[in-house]
Image (tube, rainbow, N blue to C red):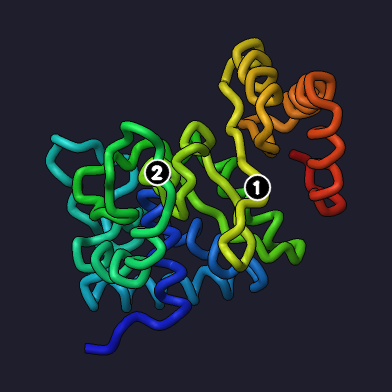
Amino acid sequence: MKSPSKNQLLVLELIGTFGYLSTREISKLARAGHEAHSAHVLAQAMLSKLAADGYVLARALGHRPGIEPTVLKPGMPRGYVLTQKGANALNEIYENEWAEAPIEVDSKVLPWFADGYNLSLTDFATRAPVIELCHSLQAHGHTLNPVGRRGLARNFLGHSDLKHFDAALFDETGKFVIAVYLAHHQTSEAAKEVVKLARQPVPFLICCDRPIRLPSLQRWRASTNPAMGAFVLDKLPPGVMA
C-alpha cells in the first residue's frame, strides 16, 4: 500500500495535534487558499481516502467516551481521529526529531501522536474561534502551521512549554512564531488570564466566542506588556483582530 502523500500527512498531522477535526475544519486549516465550497469538497475526498486506507476513523461529533457510539448516517456531522495506523505513520516520520527534542524535567515521555479512539468529541463548538483565527491568518497569506493543544501537551516539536495555550503557530521550518489563547467565557476571568499570560515572554493571540469582548482583552494584554502588544499588531494582517 502506498504511503500517505505530503498533503495527506499534513491533514493527519492536523488531526493528531488537535485530537480530532471535522471535514469543515480540515477544509479551513489545510485548504485555506481555496474557495470555501471547493475546499470542503477536497477535504471530503481526502478524508474518505484516508479513512478507506485505515489512517483515520470517522466518529460522531459530540460523542463522549464510555457512551455507545452513534451510528453514522449520510450527512451526519462527524469528526475524524487518528487510528493506530495513522499515529504510527506520523511517529515514524518524526522519529529523529522526537528523539532529539528537549523535554521538561519530570515530564512523561510520550510519542508525539496517538490514536483518538477514547477522545471526547464534545468541544467542537467551544474551540471554533481557534480554528477560525488560524484559518484567517492562513487565508491572508501567512504560511503558518497550526498545532493544537493535544500536540503541545505531547511535546510536539519540543514545545510542551506551550501546553497551556489552545494552539500555537509555527513557520515552515518548525520554528515557533506565536501562541493562541481562547478566552474564558467570563470576561473577568479572561482578563485575569490575559494579564497572567502577558507577564510571560511568550507572545499570544486572543480569540473569543463574541467579537465584542476582544478589544477589552487586547487592552489588558497591551497595558500589561506594551512590547508584546506591539509585536502582535505587527504580526496581524489587515482586518484580522486577535
Q: Residues within 10 Å of mark 1 (few under 14, many from 20)?
A: many
Above or below for 61 versus 53: above
Q: Which residue is mark 1?
A: 133
Location of residue 107 (image quadrant) = top left
Considering every residue shown, the one lying at the far top of the view is 188
Quadrant for the C terminus, please.
top right
> Residue 87's spot in the image, x, y percent?
27, 62
Location of residue 99 (image quadrant) = bottom left
Q: Residue at x 64, y 61 (%)?
A: 171
Above or below for 84 versus 169: below
Q: Which mark is residue 103?
A: 2
Q: Residue at x 21, y 88 (%)?
A: 1
Above or below for 44 versus 1: above
Mark 1 and mark 2 in contact? Answer it, CB < 8 Å: no
- Please tell me whether mark 1 sits on a helix, a strand or a loop: helix
Above or below for 26 versus 64: below
Q: Residue at x 58, y 70 (%)?
A: 31
> Residue 94's spot in the image, x, y percent?
37, 66
Amino acid type, residue under disc 1 in the picture: Leu
Q: Nearer the viewer, residue 169 or 158?
A: 158
Q: Nearer the viewer, residue 102 or 168?
A: 102
> Residue 44's spot in the image, x, y percent?
42, 71
